[in-house]
Amino acid sequence: MEEFITYILQFGDLNKQQIALILSSISEIEIHKDDYLVEAGKPFNEVVFIKEGVLRIYYYNRDGEEITKYFADENHLFKNPYANEPLTEYIQAITDCKLITIAPKDWQELSNTIISWDAILNKIFQKGLVEKMDRRSSLVSENATTRYLTFLEKFPNLVNRIPLSYIASYLGVTQQSLSRIRKNISE
Amino acid sequence: MEEFITYILQFGDLNKQQIALILSSISEIEIHKDDYLVEAGKPFNEVVFIKEGVLRIYYYNRDGEEITKYFADENHLFKNPYANEPLTEYIQAITDCKLITIAPKDWQELSNTIISWDAILNKIFQKGLVEKMDRRSSLVSENATTRYLTFLEKFPNLVNRIPLSYIASYLGVTQQSLSRIRKNISE
DNA sequence: ATAACTTTTTACCAAATGGTAAATGCTTCT
DNA sequence: AGAAGCATTTACCATTTGGTAAAAAGTTAT
């Protein structure tokens, strides 16, 4: 069965008819490493599920530095948090990705047809947000070494798949500091 | 009109009958500076609206340090992000507070009776989460001085109402550093 | 294989932040 | 007013992190 359905079923029940409707409403796209799923300033109203690959969400701060806000890997569902407003961040594939997308009008139809749709999906989005919040939050109060170790725990299969500069930008340290930290740890 | 209703009406429409039902479902409580609304390990299934005052949400990290995760002031609605699980954080009043609470069974009734209730309230919770995430997130990539200045912008009327130690713990710096920063800024 | 290019590491020094401890300032209670 | 208790500031030094630049390692194209 489609991974997306398996994922949703973790959060609520659906009957066969409902599942069929969902499957007929989704489309699958592939994007390549370094391509953008969306760029800041553009509308983004699809809902996206990551079947395979890793995306990063980043923005530029006042000094023009890239700030990686979070990584999203397999089995994550996300959408524009400010619905109907243009995105303020860049969403980039950092590995080749297979994504499932649901267009706004299909989403609307699912919402109208499947009684529990909104309840289930809201649960998923809220859980995702709380998790992102907690991960990001814990970075504030830790030193750089601890942050890197935590990153390795939370994203165990990312460190060898993506450039270190992205990790440094996620952790809020310079690439040089991260390199030094990696050296210290390996000793 | 009750502040709570005014707040909700920003996010969706309600008729007089619905408003009356809501008003009959809420209760108001007062808690004093330094008292706890909830402590870690206890259940917390009420939904709470802050009518007056400031709460802080904090936890202890591995080293036993208090980490203030965020401040919640007037006109904020919040609930346990992990519904039905015991809270992992402490919620403390840092000024005298007037709070509105809705008990789980009343919430359920509102949800069953008012068609748009879940949609409106989910919108509010998601917006709140995204905002907290963004605030917390921006702390990671900034130096301590910038973080403090941002704090002053985001919470303009907090700095004189609460102990600096809480602010330091929110910003992820020691109290001594914060004191030094405040001195530099004032010069 | 070589050259060109990008990523990562290293080095050096400056700046920022932390840790310990003491001094000062501010409240509260009697 | 004075004492006790807490909050905040200051000082000193150690440690961590940043900034600039160069070297080394890894990748890609020809």
Image (cartoon, coloured by chain):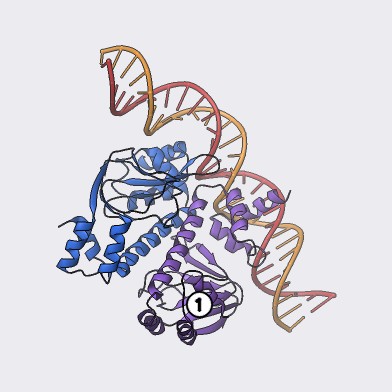
Chain colours: A purple, B blue, C red, D orange
Side of A162 where D7 appears, left or right: left
Q: Give the quadrant of the N terminus of chain B.
A: bottom left
Residue behind mark 1:
A37
Side of A163 where B72 appears, left or right: left
Q: Secondary structure at mark 1?
A: strand
In the foreground, A19 or C29: A19
Provide residue A67's location: percent of width, then percent of height.
50, 62
In the foreground, A30 or B104: B104
Q: Is residue B184 in sight in this rendering?
A: no
Provide residue B136's location: percent of width, then percent of height.
43, 54
In the foreground, A185 or B119: B119
**Residue displayed at 52% across by 44% down:** B61
- For label 1, the crowd category at 10 Å Cα-Cα, with few meaning under 14, some 14 to 19 and many 20 or more, is some
In the foreground, B12 or B135: B12
**Residue displayed at 38% across by 73% down:** A118
Give amino acid for label 1: Leu
* Image position of B88 with respect to B126: above or below: above
Provide residue B67's location: percent of width, then percent of height.
46, 44
For disc 1, the chain is A
Side of B44 where B109 appears, left or right: left
